[in-house]
Image (cartoon, coloured by chain):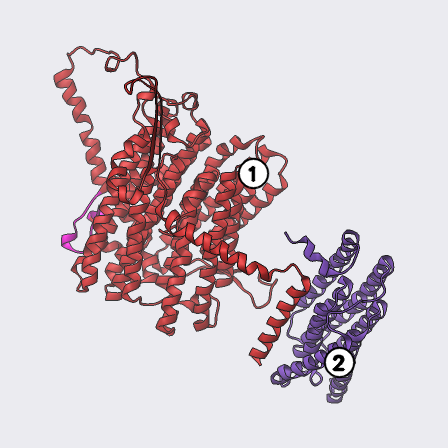
Chain colours: A red, B purple
Amino acid sequence: MNLTPAMLLLVSLCGYAIGAAGGMLLLRRERPANVWCFGVAALSGLSGLLAALLMLAGGTGTGIPQFELFRPLLPYIHFSVRLDALSAFFLLIVSLLGLAISLFSLGYAKGFFGRKNVGVLGALFNALLLATTTMFVAGDLWLFLIAWELMALTAFCLVSFEHEKAETRKAGVLYFIMSHIDAGCIILGFLLLFQASGDYSFTSLHDIGAKMSPGKRDAAFLLFLVGFGIKAGIVPLHIWLPAAHPVAPSNVSALMSGVIIKTGIYGFTRVCFDFLGTPPLWWGVTVLTVGTISAVLGVLYALMEHDLKRLLAYHSIENIGIILMGLGAALMFLHTGHPLLATLGLIAGLYHTINHATFKGLLFLGAGAVLHATHTRNMEEMGGLIKRMPQTAFFFLVGAVAISALPPLNGFVSEWLTYQALLQGFGTTESLMRLIFPLSGAMLALTGALAAACFVKAFGITFLAQPRSAHAEHAHEVSLTMRLGMGLLAAVCVVLGLFPTQFVRLLDPLTQQIIGQQLSAQLSLANGLVLGSLTAKGGTVSTLGLASMALCLLPIPFGLWWVFARKTKVRRGPTWDCGQRGLTPRMEYTATGFSKPIRMVFKALFQPHREVQREYDFSPYFAKNLRFESHVEEVFERRIYRPARILILRASRRIRTLQAGSVHAYLLYIFVTLLALLLFAS
Amino acid sequence: MPANASETGSRLITLLASLMLVLQLLVVVQRMLITNIRLFALQSLLLASIATVVAFAYGAWHVLVIAVLTLIGKVLFLPWLLERLVRRIKIEQELRPFVNMPASMLICGALTVLSYVVARPFTALERLGSNTLGVAITLLLTGFFLMINRRKALTQVLALLTTENGVILAAIALTTYGIPLIVELAIFFDVVVAVMVLGILVFRIRESFDSMDVSKLNELKW
């Protein structure tokens, strides 16, 4: 039998559907439901992964698989599936994450046994994967929008899975509202495109921007930026993200952070590079600026968090910012007519997309494993976990190194490519670009440093030192399937880091399709061992070389020890404790303490609230009770969303007089509207 | 099909459609609930005949399905259901519509004129009869007006049904072969289900509020 991408894709879609149906049938039997749902989801993910890899590895020569779903059911409406290179790339992401997270869930969902309905969780999980996959491979607006909405709905149900907690309900509703706004913007934007094309299929929308008036084209761009931006979580539209990601079950958070927010990137790439034609300069400038602000603010707010999952959620905002920096640079280069540089920017953005999916997926799974073991998300109650769950700690460390953009892991490669794209812009003639590119480059450097600081904190406080609470003390290593899921993603992080030129070659059909250029030949030096840049000044890097060098250097300290210090006597004693009697966890560095210097440097932004209450017995030197409170509130929450909420509520109260409660009045409204429309139309 | 067959068919359809319009106006001025239901049944019978004529004269056999469904559903089943409901709740007359009868007549006249004006650009598209679309829109608008004007939930159900008759008539008149069967079936079942639900609702409203007057429903508002 000859396996084609189309067939594998169909198998994958059907698999998710069967998995979801099975979950609904096994509502009352949690063990079979768990194995069935997540097992089937893992297999479907594997099938989708193969489809995407076959498609991308086929190079530019292969045709685009196309077929229709439910052909005979409905007239006029076609549900066409089209797996072009861009779709295949995102199919790769969703399937890879689907596979790894399903494996993880096989063990993780056991934590819900007897407490929540695992059948519902599994069914919704499959449905979410089905909707997301369908959305990525949709070949026309109908299927795209339907899948988009289904995705939002199932994600809402999954976020509110533990709805008995008030915090969860609140986050779910917030997510729901934001999803509605984004869907509204996207539908409006697509209507503008449809007006120009008169056809729903994506092929007819290709380069449709050339046929639109500039005003409408700009309006469409802004609508898409807001719509897809909400889904992706750009600042200041990000508020649902730090609310919704922490409260969802951890496997769902991993899926949301790894894949769901990438749907915004997919939509944005599809629309800006495929549909809207050659962009004016300000589009790129806007995207780059938004990206830069998101990156810096995302990481700054992440530093202030001591809820492990909220911290990761803020890092998603940061990474979406970095992705948008690459894409924004690409848009600007398209404007100035530098297709090769634009390709570099696009590759940087998309490379970072898959990298973020893998390491953020991995980190959320790690956080899930920690949560599973300690039943708390608060970092201040963790500590010492590296001795109790060594493998989880190792995988989390891999993810942390990757997200901090340290070589030789994957985060480094894509950020390096982003730097390349940004620095190349310095050579262009456009003065605005000469100004904005170095600035964003500097901001990216700041972001990288802060991210590294943040993960020193996250890893150090969570895994090192002594346990700070009884939960952490009694933690235990998680089950094999959970470690397998994390291990798979960790391995992908390493592979994507060590073999960048090989991966860029997979992107060739994509850039060929979108911009008409291929870069893998230019970027690949020394048989693909070294990642080059477009110009001689740009520099080269080889993660493989760095890794092997590190491996070579590793024996040196041991050799030195063997030569010089082998004979000295080893003395073991207790850690010096300043004369106190024994070290206790209360003496440890806290997460809040660790981030204090940064909180003080960026005081103007954070405006930290700090309150100290003391109680004395007779002298201020003998405090009886000391209460310290400190928190940071998001500036957007206070300055934008709260006033907006108040305004909307006030307006709603006015409008409510229309809702008189009389059926006749309602009928009259409809009737008058109908008459007006009839008169307007005739 | 010979030309004269479709010619006869077209005239027959015009005649039947105008009769539907007349019945609609009768419903507007009639207060007795039972008579209203029977008028509606008669109107539906006319619709079924139009569908049959279309099916035979133009060889559009899937329209026959609609004729049969209309006959079973709207001529026999729904009137029977509604009449039983009227007997059970023991209310025979509609009281005090918001607009009195002569004024209602005038409004409906105006709506009819409006419908014909609106339908004029499309008469060229019509394949069957002349001005059938105008009649259809009139049925729709007057049905709507009836819903607004009457207080009793039951009359509103009836008005909704006549509106739906208008929709089906438009579907048959404008696009003999165009609207796919699945859409028409969907509309039909939609309405049947709606009436069943409304029927139950009417009964419940009566039990809870001791009246069938929907204007009292605003007590539900918080």
Residue A272 visible in rendering: yes
Residue farthest left in this picture? A564
What residue did someone put label 1 on? A36
Chain at tag 1: A
Left or right: A105 with respect to A563? right
Question: Residue at coordinates 52% horizontally, 31% vertically from top-left?
Answer: A110
Residue A532 lies in the magenta-colored region: yes
Q: Is residue A348 above or below residue B142?
A: above
Question: Residue at coordinates 23% horizontally, 15% vertically from top-left?
Answer: A578
Residue farthest bottom in this picture? B4
What residue did someone put label 2 on? B17
Magenta residues? A526-542
Cα separation, mark 1 vs mark 2, equals: 59 Å
Left or right: A559 with respect to A387? left
Residue A315 lies in the magenta-colored region: no
Query: What's under tag 1, amino acid-wise?
Result: Trp
The percent coordinates of residue A164 (x first, y second) are 55, 37
Question: Residue at coordinates 37% horizontally, 37% vertically from top-left?
Answer: A363
Quadrant in which residue B47 is drawn = bottom right
Residue nearer the viewer, A68 or A376: A376
Left or right: A335 with respect to A365? left
